Every structure is written in C-alpha cells, then in structure tokens.
Image (tube, rainbow, N blue to C red):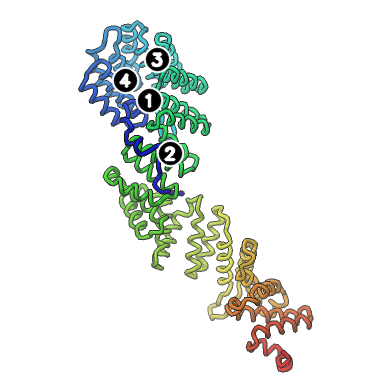
Amino acid sequence: MRTYINTLLLSGLSVGALAQAPAPDANTLMNLGQFAEAKQLLNRNAQQSPSMQSLFDAGYGYLRSGQPDSARIWFTKGLSMDEKRTPLNETGVAISYLVENNAANAEPKLAEVLKKSKSKNADILYRIGEAYTGYLTPGNGSIKPVYVKAVNAAKAIDYLNQATERDKKNAAIQLALGDAHYLNKDAGTAVTRYESALELGMNPSRVYQRIGDIYWQGRNLNLAVENYKKAIEANAAYAPAYNQLAELYFLVNRYKEAASYIDQYVRVSHDARQETLLRQAQFHFLANDFQRAVTLIDSNRTALGQNPIVYRIKGWAYSSLKQPDKAIENINTFLEKAPDKAMPDDYKYLGRAYMATDSTSDDSLGAVYLAKAAPFDTTDNLYSDIAKYYYRAKKHPEAVAILDSAAKHGFKADVQDLFRYGMSNYTLGFKRDSSGKLERDTLRFALADSALALAQQGSPEYAPTVLYRAKANYYAYAPEEAVMKGKAKPYFEQFISMIADKEEERNRYKKDLVLAFKYLISYNELVTKDEAARNEWLTKGLALFPENKDLAKIAGPNEADSQ
C-alpha cells in the first residue's frame, strides 16, 4: 500500500520550454482521453468555419468519445456540404450506426456511400476501415477499442488496404492499418504499418507512442519504455507519452518514476480532470512523498471539488507523516462521506493514526481498527502492531491470540513478535486457583521457552531472552524439581556471563542474578555432587552481592567468614 520526493523538475526540459508548449490539437487531445476539450475545439471550428470537413471532424470527435448519437447530429448537419463523389458526412452517419451495431441502418447506408464514391475514394474507404477497428484508444496502460462490438479486423484490413491502393502516401491510413493488424493478433505487421506511417510523415511522437503501446500489450516493457522516450525526444511537449510512462512505471511498482512522469504529463498537457489530479496525488503517496501528495490535493481543491477520495489520500498521507490528528480527521470524514467505498486500508491507516496519539484510549481504538484490516493486508503484518499494543497494555491473552492469528494468516514472526509471544506465555504460566493458590501452567512455560529460543537465534546478544528462557524452565516446576531437571542450568550460566561484568546491568538484574547463583549452587550440590563447582558459584555470587542474605545463609558462618 503502500503509498503514497521533493518538487520534481522535468527531465531534460526547462521551465521556459514548458511555458511555450503549443496548445494540443484535437487529435492529441483525443489521444489523451481529453474528449471534452477535443470536442470543444472541433465544435468551435465547425461553427466558425462550417465546411464538409469541419462538420465531419466535429462529429468524429463525438464518435471517438463514445457518443455516436451526438456524432450523428453533426454528420447530418454536414450532409448538405458533401461533394458528389465524396459523401464524407454521409459516411459519418453510416458508421455512427455501424459502431452501434445497428446493421439494419448501417449496411444500406454504407452500400450507398460506396456506390456514390464508386469504392474509389481513399478517404471514404479509410473512414469505414477505421470504424471497423472500433477506434483503438490508448491510455492508462491499455489500448482497446471504444466500440468492441464494431470490431471486425478482417473487414478493417480489407477496406484499409483498398484505401492504401488509392493513396499510398497517406500516413493516417497506415496508422489505422497498424491498429487493424494489432486487433488481428499480428503485432509484428502492426509495428511495420506504424513504421510506414512514420516514414510517410505521421507525427513521430504519436507513432512511437503507438508502437510503445503495442509492446506494452505484448509485455515487452523495456521496448515500450524505449518507444515512449523516443516519442518525448521527438516532441518534448507530447503529453500522452508521459502519461503512458507514468502508468507503466506504476504497473511495475516503480512509484518514484511514476510520480515523476505524471508530474511532467500534467505540466505539459494542463490536464486538470479530477481523475488525473487524484492519480497524481496517489502516485506521490505510493512514492512515499506524502507531503507532496497532500500539497497536490490542497492546491487543486477547486478542481477536485467534493470528491471524497481526497480525504482518503490526505488521511493516509497524514498517518504516514505521523500527524495522527489530521489523519483521523480526514479518514473519518472520508468514511462518513463514502461509507460504501470503505476498504481495509482505510482502517489500517486509521488504526495506526489512533495508536500514534498520546491517548491510551485511542490505542485501544487503534487496535480495533487494525484488527478489521489485518486479515486483508498481505503486505504489512498488522497483527504485530496489535500484539505490541496488547503486550504493553499487559493484555497477555489477547497478545498471544493475535500472534497466533498472524501465524495462521502466513506471517512470519520477527524477533520482537517472538519475544512478546514468549513473554506473554511466560506471564500466563503463573495461574491462581479459586483460593488464590499459585498453579504452574507447564504448557505455557514450554510455549514461552520455544518462542524465546527462536528469538534468541535472531538476537543472541539480548540478555532478557536468555534470562526468561532460564526462568521459564525454572518456574515450570516446583523449586526442587526444577533444580533436579536441570533445564534452566545452561541459560542461567549464560545469563551470568552476559551480565556479571556490567555494573549497570548487574544492578538492574540483581534479583535475577541472585536467583541464577542460587540455582547453580543447588544444582551442583544436589545433582552433580560437585563441591568445587558448588563453591565456585557461591564464591562468585558473594563477590558480587556480599550483603545478600540468601547467599550468606547458604554459605553459613564459616564459609561467609572465609569470603
């Protein structure tokens, strides 16, 4: 999620170059998916300078945007301006029915325009052939037809080949032929046709982008990137290539590159659509540039309006920025405005924000929210965060249960998880019966030792792990039985060797060290019958803690005097 880079400058571009970037033409706007802007431009041109071509172009803008009914209105307006052998707007009307899959109206009208043009007009043949491609439209990492039901690759290739025979130097026909061959699952020929379009003078940026799209669909991402960059080299203001690069890098989880290219795309294209601005903020969040994500949203509030997603992105970003109060405010606002859009990550960031406040009650609420998100999160082990809270709150049954859940969901416990699991089980090993009498839960102590053993492997120099392995093996039994079994012996010995020479640590663990010495003295006295070893441990203990009454009592008056 991970979400979401200082101000990024355009790679290879100066600010001056951007300021002078020409306004995109209608074709480029349609390639960007900015159909509203493209239609506005085409409509204005048709109204100011009505002609056969301008009226067709206005209808074509609506056709490309998926609005054949509106397209037909403009084509109908242009019927009176059609030339006898060039029924261009009549062709527009016919293909507006074709893309609607309305064969009853489309077929006779197509037959009529072919009759009027004697099937010899390259532009008419091209427009029909292109319609059968369904108008491939690249964007956001895909290249697919606007009208899927209209697609007929074989007919598209047939009409476009006929058009080519009558106009061999028409780059637009070659580009459409590339689309048709792509739809015919012949990417190699598609690229060849695109290259022909380039040779015939087609905008090289557009061609390279199209080739990049084809390689992307074939999962050859390196060649896709290479061609998108060629598109930018050919025209540094060609926005679609920046957009495709941003989406490609997003696809492969290279979020910093994705954020950089979407910044460049927005600057070049001036695309202020809500979905674009939200995408930009999202990419910066994913690139871990959380402040940039917040700044982008705040600076575009007018364009973003009341879209509730802005509160989600800001909330997640503030949670990651360790500004929990702002995170809680924004995420709760999102959940209030769009409860049907709630997702596990909302509860993850909300839970973390509550846990980052200074309030103990908020910690408890944070654990509740994290528990709602944990089963669905495959990236972060939220169970570990919850266990940390329960452990610190001394809610040991809950800590053990949540770490068991983590294991069931496939999360591998880290050293801290193992230590907490061990210590919680150790604590739970001391039970009281109804009368208040102490009962030892040997299973709990065994679980504690097992977990602490794994923790010790990960952090062998951490003395508390060794100490509580010793104590788990000691308190699992009655004192004499514990000594006779000897399970605690190696850990008490190791603990003494780790702590005895460190004054600060020695004072901190004074009671535990005395217990360790007493255990080892008893062990050598009762089990090994090794008097020399027994006396050696006693001597070491008295040297460190000469005023300890228990050790002095073990030594007796004679031994104590000799120390």
Q: In this figure, which residue is indicated by the disc labeled 3?
A: 170
Indicate whether 431 appears above or below 332. below
Q: CA distance from mark 2 to mark 3?
A: 34 Å
> Which quadrant holds the C terminus?
bottom right
| Residue at the image point whose x is 70% and y is 91% from the top | 560
Q: Position of residue 71 (x, y in %)?
A: 28, 23
Amino acid type indicated by mark 3: Asn
* Local crowd size for mark 3, using a 10 Å CA cut-off: few (<14), some (14–19), many (≥20): some
| Residue at the image point whose x is 44% and y is 57% from the top | 370
Answer whether residue 309 is visible to the viewer in this image: no
**Secondary structure of residue under mark 4:** helix
Quadrant in the rendering for residue 439: bottom right
Q: Indicate left or right for 420 with 454 as reference.
A: left
* Local crowd size for mark 4, using a 10 Å CA cut-off: few (<14), some (14–19), many (≥20): many
Q: Position of residue 154 (x, y in %)?
A: 45, 16
Amino acid type indicated by mark 1: Tyr
Q: Residue 147 got which mark? A: 1
Q: Indicate left or right for 91 with 503 as reference.
A: left
Q: CA distance from mark 1 to mark 4?
A: 11 Å
Q: In this figure, which residue is indicated by the disc labeled 4?
A: 96
Amino acid type indicated by mark 4: Ser
Q: In this figure, which residue is indicated by the disc labeled 2?
A: 11
Quadrant in the rendering for residue 350: bottom left
Q: Earlier in the sequence, mark 3 or mark 1?
A: 1
Q: CA distance from mark 2 to mark 4?
A: 42 Å
Amino acid type indicated by mark 2: Ser
| Residue at the image point whose x is 40% and y is 8% from the top | 166
**Secondary structure of residue under mark 1:** loop
Indicate whether 123 appears above or below 142. above
From the viewer's side, name the closer residue of 313 and 421.
313
